[in-house]
Amino acid sequence: MAFRRGPYCLLAALLLSQLTAGLAAAGPGDIAVYWGRNKDEGTLREACDTGAYTTVLIAFLSAFGHGTYTLDLSGHPVAGVGDDIKHCQSKGVLVLLSIGGQGGEYSLPSSQAASDLAEYLWNAFLAGGRAGVSRPFGDAQVNGVDFFIDQGATEHYDELARFLYAYNRFYRAGGITLTATPRCSYPDQRLQGALATGLIGRIHVRLYGDLQCTWSARESWEKWAAAYPGSRVFVGVVASPEADKDAYMSQKDLYYNVLQFAQKLPNYGGLMIWNRYYDKINNYISSGQTSDLARFSI
C-alpha cells in the first residue's frame, strides 16, 4: 500500500520550504573561514575552490612583539601558498593573515613593538618589500590583517591598527582590510582599544570557547552588534562538535537561535566558520552544493 503523508507532515514540509526559500533569498551573508590549523584540511586553493567561502583567514602569525616572527600553518608547506592566494583572489575570495591565536608567543609591550610589527607585516605579507625581509608567500599580497588576540597585555593594538591603516596611502585602489576576532563576552579588553579606533571594518564574534556565551549566544552577539554599528559584525561558530561540543549548533539551531534575529540588523555581516578542517569533516558549509545557502535551514 502506498504511503500517505498526513496533514501535519504536509504542513511541516510547507513551512520548511518557506524557510528554505527565505534563506535562499537573503542568505547568511559573507562566509569567512579560518585555514591553516590542520594539515589534513587540504590546501588553501582547495578551500577556495569549494565556492563556499568569501573570505579565508590564514592562521596564524603566532609570534611577534619581541623581534622574532613565526608563521605557524600546522604543518602545511609554505611553498605554493602564494600561488594559492593569487588563485583565491582571482575567484573573488578575500585572503587575510590572522595574527595571534592560542598558545603562541606574542605581545605588544610598547609603541615601538607595534610600529615594528606593522612594518614587518607591510614588507612580508602586504604590498611592501624591503631587503632582508623574507616574504613567506613570495610576491603574493594578502588583502589585510585579522586581530585574533587571546593573550598578553591589552595595550598598543590600537596603535598597530593605526600604523597599518596608514599604509593605505600607498594604494591607488582598495587598501588594507582590518578585522578583529574577539571572544564573545563583551567587551574583549585585549581588542577594545583597536576597535575604538573605528578602523576595523569587520568583527568576527566567537560564539564558542566560553560557556556563558554558549548559554546566551544570541544575546552575546547582539551586544557586539549594538556596540559597533559602523562595523560589519559576523556570527562566529564552530563547524563540528569536535571543535567545541558545548557551543556547536546544528544549522537548524543556528538559524532559529541566532541567524533569524541577527540577519534583521543592518550591520550583520555573515558567518565566520572555525575552521576549514572541521568544516571539511562535517560538511557544515562546504558539502558540494556550496552555493545553496539555504542549507542553514535544514
Image (cartoon, grey):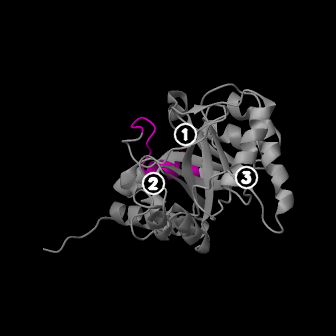
Image location (x, y in percent) of residue 39: 39, 51
Q: Can residue 29 be seen at all in this image of the molecule? A: no
| Quarter occupied by the N terminus | bottom left
Residue sitting nearer the eye, 199 or 23: 199
Q: Which residue is mark 1?
A: 207
The amino acid sitting under disc 2 is: Arg
Say the numbered circle drawn on residue 99.
none
252 drawn magenta? yes
Q: Which residue is mark 2?
A: 276
The amino acid sitting under disc 1 is: Leu
Q: Which residues are magenta?
A: 244-259
Q: Residues within 10 Å of mark 1 (few under 14, many from 20)?
A: many
Q: Which residue is mark 3?
A: 122
State which mark lies toward you, 3 or 1: 3
Query: Which quadrant of the structure image shows residue 30?
Result: bottom right
Q: Tag 1 or tag 2, which sits nearer the N-term?
A: 1
Residue at horizontal 44 percent and vertical 55 percent from the top: 77
Image location (x, y in percent) of residue 215: 51, 32
Residue furthest front in the image: 132
Q: Residues within 10 Å of mark 3 (few under 14, many from 20)?
A: many
